Image: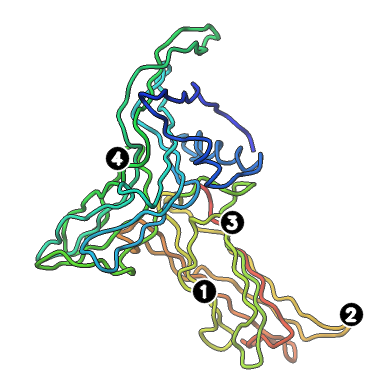
Amino acid sequence: MGMEHRFSYPYVSGDSTFGELVTALKLQQLGSYPRDTLLDLLGDLLCRKADGTKDSGVVSGMAVTPSATVEGLLHVETGLALYYSLAQDVAGNLAISPIVCNSGEAESWVTLEAPDSTNNRYDLIVARPAGALADYATRQVMLADGSKSTQNLPARYGEGVLVVAIPGTPAASPVAPDPTLGDVVLASVLVTADSAPHVIPANCVFDAREFLSPYVGGVNEYQVTAKGSADGSLEDIVERVSNPSIHVATSIARSAEGAYAVTLEIPARMIPDGVSPLVEATVQTVGAYGALTTPFVVNPILDSMTGSSGGEMLKSYTIAFTTWQESAGAFAKADLSGIRYLNAKVTFPRA
């Protein structure tokens, strides 16, 4: 992976007056990452889109769940994110701030505004660093021409996370609102029309976290292997994603004779407009060495693409796999038997 950019100035820890956003203890509690994984995280953060724009993202955790008893209340789990703040360095680049969320703190909860009495709406749940900006760190920085300059670097005092609900506009066909520059997007929430606040159902919270590549190689992939059973269904299914931003909305399953399908969701901002994923699949026959087996082939098809999930925050893809068996020189649709495995991979392009 090529590193085209580096931090334009160091993150400076605060003193006892200002505090600091991330302590060594907090980072240790959130887990450790190998060297190559950290390079992927930094590469995604500093230049993670093909058009050169940058964005905030989640490193780990920070899933949003609704309260089962309190009206309009949502909770953010413990996690770590990296945030592009509105502060700028001397070269005009956006500053980078870590965000640590502790699920046991009051700041990890957010309450939605009351619902509209007529129309549904989508609210966006985002995270920002708590505290305010302050110029308190004097450091020498290297300018573009190679010369050094002494500057007061913008930093942030206060500690922790600020969870914000950005309310959407009620409408007959509502969409989620846009985040503010630098916001770490966590979820979109469907707030159904009601005369009074109500408990938010779990199926109305759509996970829209964009993870900063917590894996080596920087490829957004879904992989599956599954064995055909005697009745044509699938068993011993193993599904994996290289990026937790990819959600398996509906696991792979048989839909008709010789037909299998899976539905995947991924945050819409991670996929370039007009670009579809690459789908590959093979059928593997398990048998004695040298044994002759009836040929099987599989035809993977991108069955549908929609942007309707979570107020158009998530793109949904349904991939169909049709299996064909050769007989008397011709192929016909056929279920996988107990000695055949379906191996498939779906690769999403990176925005």
Q: Residue at x 39, y 55 (%)?
A: 208
**Real-space Cα separation, disc 2 to disc 3, in angstroms:** 33 Å
Distance from disc 1 to disc 2, alpha carbons, whole Å, reads 32 Å
Residue identifier under label 1: 251
Secondary structure under badge 2? loop
Residue 141's x, y, as percent?
50, 13
Label 4: element kind: loop
Of mark 3 and mark 1, the one earlier in the sequence is 3
Indicate whether 278 appears above or below 336: above
Amino acid type shown at disc 3: Ser
Percent position of residue 173, x then y? 21, 63
Q: CA distance from mark 4 to mark 3?
A: 28 Å
Depth check, mark 2 against mark 3: the one in front is 3
Hey, what amino acid is under mark 2?
Tyr
Number of the label disc, if any, that sits on residue 242: 3
Distance in Å between CA atoms under marks 4 and 1: 34 Å
Viewer-nearest of discs 1 and 2:
1
- Ranked by sequence position, the earlier of labels 2 and 3 is 3
Tell me if 328 is positioned left or right of 194 in this view.
right
